[in-house]
Image (spheres, rainbow, N blue to C red):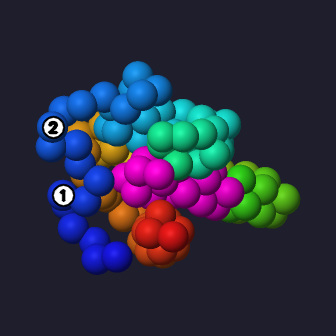
Amino acid sequence: MEYNSTQGTNPTGAVPAGGLSQNAAAAIAYITIIPAIIFLVMEPYNKIPFVRFHSFQSLCLGVAAIIVETILGVIPVIGWIMLPFVALAFLAIWIYTVLQAYKGNWFKLPGIGDFALTQASK
């Protein structure tokens, strides 16, 4: 599957049977890992590559945040000083990805985005 900005868009503007547009579902997938998992198992969203991509990217971003913040939390002094700044960076990334998903963009985070794109194309 080749990456481009028009994949998974809904040119007719039709709303899937579940009632959410693709853009709304992709943005909601970033709220916590729970909506992301639900969209990966619930039809019709698990058939839409755009929603699958953002759901996988959301899961990977959440796991990365937990791992990095846990590691920084156990490192005395330096880690504790860096932790609030890293958490703020993850918050900024999260807000940006929510906005990009809502706009209908296939924004790929470095490393994580490639994995998410591979999983979405399966």
User: Residue at horizontal 48%, vertical 42%?
Assistant: 45
Element marked by disc 2: loop
Residue pushed farthest left? Answer: 11
In the displayed structure, 67 sits above or below 2; it is above
Chief SS of the magenta region: helix
**Coordinates of residue 98 in the picture (x, y in percent):** 39, 40
To which residue does mark 1 refer?
Answer: 6
Instruction: Answer few, some or many: residues within 10 Å of disc 1's Cα (few below 14, many 20 plus, some between 14 and 19).
Output: few
* Three-letter residue code for mark 2: Thr
Residue 91 at what x, y percent from top left?
49, 42
Residue 63 within the magenta-colored segment of the rendering: yes
Can you say whether 3 is above or below 89 in the image? Answer: below
Percent position of residue 121, x then y: 44, 69
Q: Earlier in the sequence, mark 1 or mark 2?
A: 1
User: Judging from the image, what secondary structure is the residue with disc 1 in?
Assistant: loop
What residue did someone put label 2 on?
12
The vertical placement of 24 against 1, above or below, is above
Look at 41% across and 41% down and name the residue there: 26
The residue that appears at 43% across and 35% down in the rendered structure is 25
- The foreground one among 55 and 19 is 19
Q: CA distance from mark 1 to mark 2?
A: 13 Å
Q: Which residue is found at the position 22% from the left and 43% from the top?
A: 10
Magenta stretch: residue 53 in it?
Answer: yes
* 44 to the left or right of 35: left
Viewer-closest of 9 and 98? 9
Q: Tell me which segment is drawn in magenta.
A: 47-64
The answer to whether residue 120 is visible is yes
Screen quadrant of the N terminus: bottom left
Picture quadrant where residue 109 is located:
bottom left
